[in-house]
Amino acid sequence: NVNVAERIDYVFKVVVIGDSAVGKTQILSRFAKNEFCFDSKSTIGVEFQTRTVTISGKLIKAQIWDTAGQERYRAVTSAYYRGALGAMVVYDITKRQSFDHVARWIEELRAHADTSIVIMLIGNKADLLDRRAVRTEDAVEFAEDQGLFFSETSALTGENVETAFFKILQQIHSVVS
Ligand code: GDP
């Protein structure tokens, strides 16, 4: 829509990182298209999706980048991080290892991204409560130590996905404006 395009106030690039299979692609399509796809392999190769939202009366185009499977080959390049104003570091609440690797992903961000980047820690698959392997309190403590925002989400049910994106976009807006 040309009229909307002309009125965009900001474009915010947000990267989504974390171990393979934690649900990065599904979180992104939940936010961008309100979809959950049980076979997400078809999305490999897609670089980013966008959604335009209004925050504090400003029209903000969120450009959300997906690693598109690159993390499997440790090939997330510095080009991926370039210009990113926000990052969502995702782990799976049922996979302890994916939480243990978060520190590494944060280091990766500190090495490649802008120092003012807004970082949000996301514990995904919150619908799988009976298989929980990471306590909420542990994640809250880690997030506080590292100065990150934190939320548990479910791309499957949609729980907290929208709220998490609005939170990070609002925060970026308050940093840039
Ligand atoms: P990625 O490799 O991090 O992009 O992960 P995907 O988005 O491809 O998801 C990996 C697997 O987890 C897929 O089988 C998804 O259907 C599943 N998945 C993703 N998000 C959720 C969620 O919130 N809840 C549940 N139960 N499964 C999910």
Image (spheres, rainbow, N blue to C red):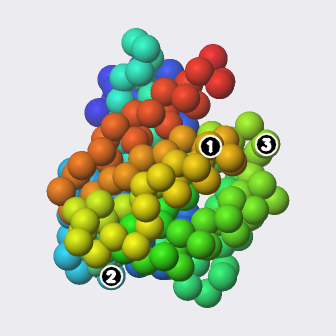
Q: Which residue matches tag 2?
A: 41
Q: CA distance from mark 1 to mark 3?
A: 18 Å
Q: Is residue 15 left or right of residue 21?
A: right
Q: Which residue matches tag 3?
A: 115
Q: Which label's residue is closer to the chain start, 2 or 1? A: 2
In x, y percent, where is residue 39? 23, 80
Q: CA distance from mark 2 to mark 1?
A: 34 Å
Q: Which label's residue is closer to the chain start, 1 or 3? A: 3
Q: Residue at x 22, y 52 (%)?
A: 158
In x, y percent, where is residue 160? 30, 45
Q: Is mark 3 within 8 Å of ligand 1?
A: no
Q: Is mark 1 within 8 Å of ligand 1?
A: no
Q: Nearer the viewer, mark 2 or mark 3?
A: 3
- Give the secondary structure at mark 1: helix
Q: Is residue 28 visible?
A: no
Q: Which quadrant would residue 115 be assigned to in this image?
A: top right
Of the residues shown, which amino acid type is indicated by label 1?
Glu
Q: Is residue 146 above or below residue 169?
A: below
Q: Nearer the viewer, mark 2 or mark 1?
A: 1
Q: Is residue 162 left or right of residue 136?
A: left
Q: Nearer the viewer, mark 1 or mark 3?
A: 1
Q: Which residue matches tag 1?
A: 144
